[in-house]
Amino acid sequence: MELTSTQELILWLGTAGMAIGAVIIAAIGFSLPNNERHHVTASFFVCAIAACAYLAMATGTGVVEVAGQQIFYARYVDWVVTTPLLLLGLLTVGLAPLTGGGDAARARNGLIGWVLGADVLMIATGLIASLRGDNSDKWIWYAISCVFFLLVLWALFSPVKAHLDAASKPLFTKLLGILTVLWFIYPILWVLGTEGTGALSLTGEILVFAVIDVLAKVAFGIVLVTGVKSSHKATA
Ligand code: RET
């Protein structure tokens, strides 16, 4: 399919935003001591993967026509990998370091499995919903995706909060607040966009997704790594 020049430009700007974000996050990472750099890895790859996804879309791949609408399935390929990495970044910052293994370690790993498992299902069922075109069962898939979204949030606000490292609680709380606000925009935008009711034009949808994608990945990643950096300084 043919993208308009405006749509193409937005996708190129998205590519640049993600690539620049990856470089900034890596640079901040290198200014951290070796034993703190593990916090940076997930945030770096989130931006690097998204840069590739945006490049794919800008060059006209990763899009399919369903019932006369252009569906960018490349977004879901991106999200199915990057949202678990974003959550892993948040969990790596928030959860207390494991010492001694045993049942505490199993409980922690179970919790991580829960958050990531529910998140992958949220994106996978959202992809199915977006490929259902005019079929009314797309709203069933949408609702299933929302249930898994709420499960992710519930896990973060309840059992994960109960296992937090005291020192990283303020950073975790800040990141969780940013994540909650930004992530809620996605299901709303989906309903307004071409996958849902089509109230918004394809160009408008591409633009709003690009802006929240950059905020949810680059801005979130920068807050995370700079937060780790300043809390390291405070304890050093
Ligand atoms: C969909 C549609 C179906 C219902 C729900 C959705 C949620 C998507 C989310 C995506 C988050 C993406 C991020 C990308 C980073 O750049 C699949 C839109 C609940 C929460 C954070």
Image (cartoon, rainbow, N blue to C red):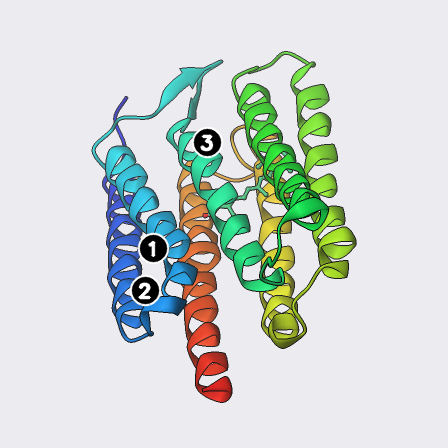
Residue sitting nearer the eye, 4 or 207: 207
Marked residue nearer the N-terminal end (3 or 1): 1
Marked residue nearer the N-terminal end (1 or 2): 2
The residue carrying pointer 2 sits among few (fewer than 14), some (14 to 19) or many (20 or more) residues within 10 Å by Cα, namely: many
Query: Of the residues shown, which amino acid type is indicated by label 2?
Result: Ile
Judged left or right of residue 212, residue 15 is: left
Q: Secondary structure at mark 1?
A: helix
Residue 109, given in percent of the width and then of the height, sits at 62, 43
Query: Of the residues shown, which amino acid type is indicated by label 3?
Result: Tyr
Residue to which mark 3 is pinned: 76
Residue to which mark 2 is pinned: 25
Q: Secondary structure at mark 3?
A: helix
The residue at 71%/54% (across/down) is: 160
Indicate the quadrant where residue 143 lies.
top right
Q: CA distance from mark 2 to mark 3?
A: 23 Å
Q: Quick check: is the Cβ at mark 2 less than 8 Å away from ligand 1? A: no
Q: CA distance from mark 3 to mark 1?
A: 19 Å
Query: Of the residues shown, which amino acid type is indicated by label 1?
Result: Phe
Marked residue nearer the N-terminal end (2 or 3): 2
Residue to which mark 1 is pinned: 44
The residue at 67%/21% (across/down) is: 141
Given contact means CB atoms under 8 Å apart, are the residues at marks 1 and 2 in contact? yes
Given contact means CB atoms under 8 Å apart, are the residues at marks 3 and 1 in contact? no
Q: Quick check: is the Cβ at mark 3 less than 8 Å away from ligand 1? A: yes
